[in-house]
Amino acid sequence: MKRVEYSKLEASFFQYARLDEMPSVRAMLEDVRKNGDKAVRKYAIQFDGLEENEPFELTREQIRSAYAQVEPATLEALKTAARRIRSFAQKQMDSMKEFESEEEGLMLGQKIVPLGRVGCYVPGGRYPLPSTALMTAIPAKVAGVKEVIVCSPKIKAATIVAADLAGADRIFNLGGVQAVGAMAYGTASVPRVDKIVGPGNQYVTAAKKNVYGEVGIDFIAGPSEVMVVADETADAAFVAADMLAQAEHDTAARADLITDSKALAEKVAAELQRQLSVLPTREVAEKALQNGCIVLVDSMEQAVEIADRRAPEHLELQGKKAEKLALQFSNYGSLFIGPWCAEVFGDYCSGTNHTLPTNGAARYTGGLSVKDYVKVLTYQKAGEKGAKKLAPVASELARVEGLFGHKNAADVRARK
């Protein structure tokens, strides 16, 4: 893993990966738009091994049988995680308020309205992610979404159970570009949704980017990232373990350590090699580690600057300075404070959402939450007194903008 001093940090450290437009993805989406289930089935057979006549949607009997295939310890862990995720999502929902206020004869208000139908994409490639079924579907149900569908390729029993525990209304054994297209455009088998949420590989990401506008999406996400900011008191074994936890996701994943301690940098480098040597996912993690680096800074102020410029998906603060530093950071998907707060707790069961912005998106958005499943709608009601007070203001601004139909709509009320 590369090591570099702050003064020699290159601009490339702060550059984000370009998301390939992928013409092949656009062609597949257009095929799904035109040919519906026929195109979806063609790609599902080609990429996911779906049988020729196998239905896309799981039956209630298949969902029930999945419970018998999941080990009791796994089922209990899924239930515990679901309970914690639901509890946090409910607290988020409770913080979103409807209100009305009267201001000078005009009644103004805000309504919180859930979306009608949401599609949750759950990856099922290298690693099936039942935790993502919990993270995407539970907040939707807490928000009051009327229908939640889950799509996952080569769907595993644990993912089926997780989706059912999360409250999914319909579950589909579909993935990839074809699943995104089916949810975006609707087919005879897959209903059109209002919004698609959830992570995926580069093809899924490109597909979500292409269908945005037809439907809403949460955000464009790339490979997983973690940045650890640590002082000399940090536990090198903890730091290395958390970096490897993200590195094993994908060869394109990224793990960085920012520290003001040369001694810690050396200990972590050694720990990475020691833990890597016995890690079952070493082949992936070892390649991913080459994407990041260990940066030696002169002060924690420099560490804050680097982290906020990079805007990592996961930001960990390790060592005795963690609590004091926490409020200084602004750009991150989710923050983990202190040595005992492992990032993997956020991945699975702390209660916060693990569907987070990557590739610099944390500069302008937070992670998935109940707010992604509702619309904040405003309304107003005016009587004659309020209208006559506002009409001159609206009239003047309309005149400045050259919109004389707007001006007239205000003026006719002022003259009445």
Image: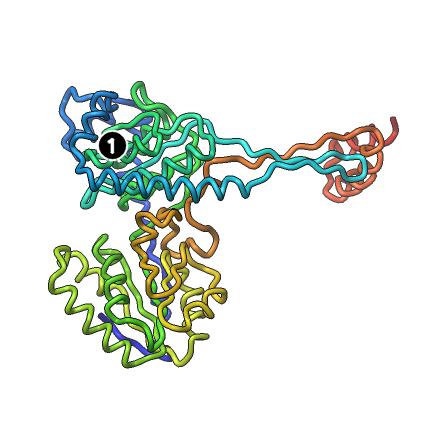
The residue at the point 40 percent across, 26 percent down is 147
Q: Which residue is mark 1?
A: 160
The residue at the point 28 percent across, 63 percent down is 255
The quarter holding residue 217 reads top left
Frontmost residue, 29 versus 1: 1
Q: Is residue 400 above or below residue 162?
A: below
Coordinates of residue 58 in the picture (x, y in percent):
24, 24
Q: Is residue 22 above or below residue 302?
A: above
Frontmost residue, 185 versus 103: 103
Frontmost residue, 185 versus 136: 136
The residue at the point 32 percent across, 25 percent down is 170
Q: Residue furthest right?
A: 415
Q: Amino acid at mark 1?
A: Ile
Coordinates of residue 162 in the picture (x, y in percent):
28, 35
Q: Quadrant of the N terminus?
A: bottom left
> Would residue 363 be found to the left or right of residue 346 on screen?
right
- Circle count: 1
Element carrying mark 1: helix
The quarter holding residue 234 reads bottom left
The quarter holding residue 332 reads bottom left
Q: Is residue 407 above or below residue 300?
A: above
Which color scheme does this rendered protein use? Answer: rainbow
Coordinates of residue 4 in the picture (x, y in percent):
30, 76
- Mark 1 neighbour density, 10 Å: few (under 14) some (14–19) many (20 or more): many
Q: Quadrant of the C terminus?
A: top right
Coordinates of residue 362 in the picture (x, y in percent):
43, 55
